[in-house]
Structures are given as C-alpha cells and as structure tokens.
C-alpha cells in the first residue's frame, strides 16, 4: 500500500511524519502546549506517556515501523508551514481494504475547520487512490467536537460500545461511538 508522502489541500497540507529528532521536537512542543486540551480524550498526552521529546521520538519510530508493514500512516497537519496536529490511519487491513482515521489538533488552532479539511483529504486518498472499501472513526461519547467532525463529513453512525474504556481523568468507564463510510457512499457523495 503506497501512501502519498504529501497531500496538498486548500488551506491544509498533510505530510507523512518520519522518525527523526527534529520531527519529534516539533510534535512534542505542540502536545506539551495543548496537554490539558488533549488529555481528556487522548491518554497518550499524559505526562506518564509523553513526558519528553524522546517519548515522541519513540512513538514516531513505532509509527514508522507500522507504516513499513502497511498497518498505519501518520500525517502531520500543516497550515502555512506550521505544524498544528495529526491525522492518521491505523489498523489498516489490506485484505479487507479498511482502516480507521484518527486526529487531534493544537488547542490554538481548533475551531477553524482544519481537522475536517484534513480528514476529507485523507479519505479522498483512501477511497480514490488506495481503493479502500471501508473507513471508520470512533470517539468517546462525551467528545462532542470529535463526533461533530464525523457528522460534518457525513459518516454513518454504526452504534455505541458501552463502557468501552476506563477514563482515569473522569474516573469512570466511558461509551464509544462508532462511525463509518463505505466506498459506494463516498462516491455517491
Ligand atoms: C476533536 C478535534 C480534533 C476537533 O477539532 P475542531 O477544530 O473542532 O474541528 P474542525 O477543524 O473540523 O473545526 C470545526 C469547527 O471550526 C468551525 N469552522 C470555522 N471555520 C470553518 C471552516 N472554514 N470550515 C469548517 N469549519 C469551520 C466550525 O464551525 C466548528 O466549530 P464548532 O465546533 O464551534 O461548531 C479537537 O477538538 C481536538 O483535537 N480535541 C482533542 C483531541 C481529540 O479529541 N481527538 C479526537 C479523539 S477521537
């Protein structure tokens, strides 16, 4: 599966992230600045998991390994050459032509439609260039901003996985909402 290294949109540019110290520093800085914004939804942003840029480097090394195996791809979201967040495809199953899109953005750049634009560009890559048949997205049922991205891009609600994860910050089990889009739905528009 050959992903494009760079996808250029109207306002947003997606660049595949590689494991090197410069990239690790760039990503770590944004995670560190937006820790409180990300943490309720993404446990990787905790100080236990991402305390230093070396932790981010390890994440990039692991991502690179998965990319080489065709299991995932991680793109940086750039606006005017500034790194503002990530969108990725994980759990790629080439024989079933499916995968899951994830995303996060710096708190300073949220609320501008950049994530919706980035995910739209990524799904175009998946359905049109790579012939995917099914793309899923999922979120904590309390994560309204995330669910809004899925709804805005016309993903179909598939269901709720009850108490799917334990959320230490809220000290409770949280439900997960699953959304998907199929190839035929994508091409119907
Ligand atoms: C979830 C998350 C990525 C959503 O980011 P976002 O910036 O709200 O999403 P978008 O880029 O699609 O922007 C949509 C917002 O921009 C507004 N907007 C402004 N200009 C816009 C434009 N040109 N086009 C589209 N939307 C625009 C929309 O009205 C919307 O605002 P609203 O939510 O107040 O209605 C972000 O909140 C985040 O990173 N949260 C923490 C991590 C996380 O939860 N990740 C997902 C885990 S499942």
Image (tube, rainbow, N blue to C red):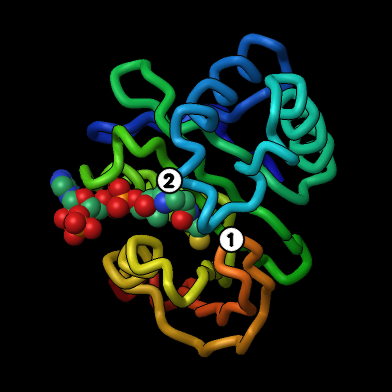
Residue 58 as seen in the image, left or right of residue 166: right
**Image coordinates for residue 93, horizontal then vertical, percent:** 75, 63
Q: CA distance from mark 1 to mark 2?
A: 12 Å
Q: Which residue is mark 1?
A: 169
**Image coordinates for residue 101, horizontal then vertical, percent:** 55, 57
Q: Quadrant of residue 90?
A: bottom right
Is the residue 155 above or below the residue 118 in the image?
below
Residue at image coords 51%, 56%? 40
Q: Residues within 10 Å of mark 1 (few under 14, many from 20)?
A: few
Depth order, front residue of 66/93: 66
SS at badge 2: helix
Q: Which residue is mark 2?
A: 37
Depth order, front residue of 171/182: 171
Look at the numbered discs 1 and 2 and tell me whether their residues touch, using CB distance below 8 Å. Answer: no
Number of marks in the rendered image: 2
Residue 68 as seen in the image, left or right of residue 163: right
Depth order, front residue of 60/34: 34
The tag earlier along the polypeptide, 1 or 2, is: 2
């Amino acid at each position: 599966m050959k992903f494009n290294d760079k996808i250029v949109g109207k306002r947003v540019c997606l660049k595949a992230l590689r494991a090197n110290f410069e990239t690790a520093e760039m990503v770590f800085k944004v995670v560190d600045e937006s820790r409180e914004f990300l943490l309720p939804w993404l446990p990787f942003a905790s100080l236990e998991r991402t305390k230093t840029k070396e932790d981010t480097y390890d994440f990039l090394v692991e991502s690179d390994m998965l990319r080489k195996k065709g299991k995932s791809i991680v793109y940086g979201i750039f606006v005017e050459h500034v790194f503002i967040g990530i969108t990725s495809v994980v759990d790629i199953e080439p024989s079933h032509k499916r995968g899951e899109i994830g995303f996060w953005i710096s708190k300073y750049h949220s609320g501008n439609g950049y994530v919706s634009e980035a995910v739209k560009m990524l799904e175009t890559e998946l359905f049109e260039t790579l012939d995917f048949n099914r793309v899923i997205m999922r979120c904590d049922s309390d994560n309204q901003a995330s669910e809004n991205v899925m709804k805005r891009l016309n993903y179909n609600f598939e269901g709720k996985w009850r108490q799917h994860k334990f959320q230490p910050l809220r000290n409770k089990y949280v439900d997960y909402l699953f959304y998907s889009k199929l190839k035929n739905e994508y091409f119907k528009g």
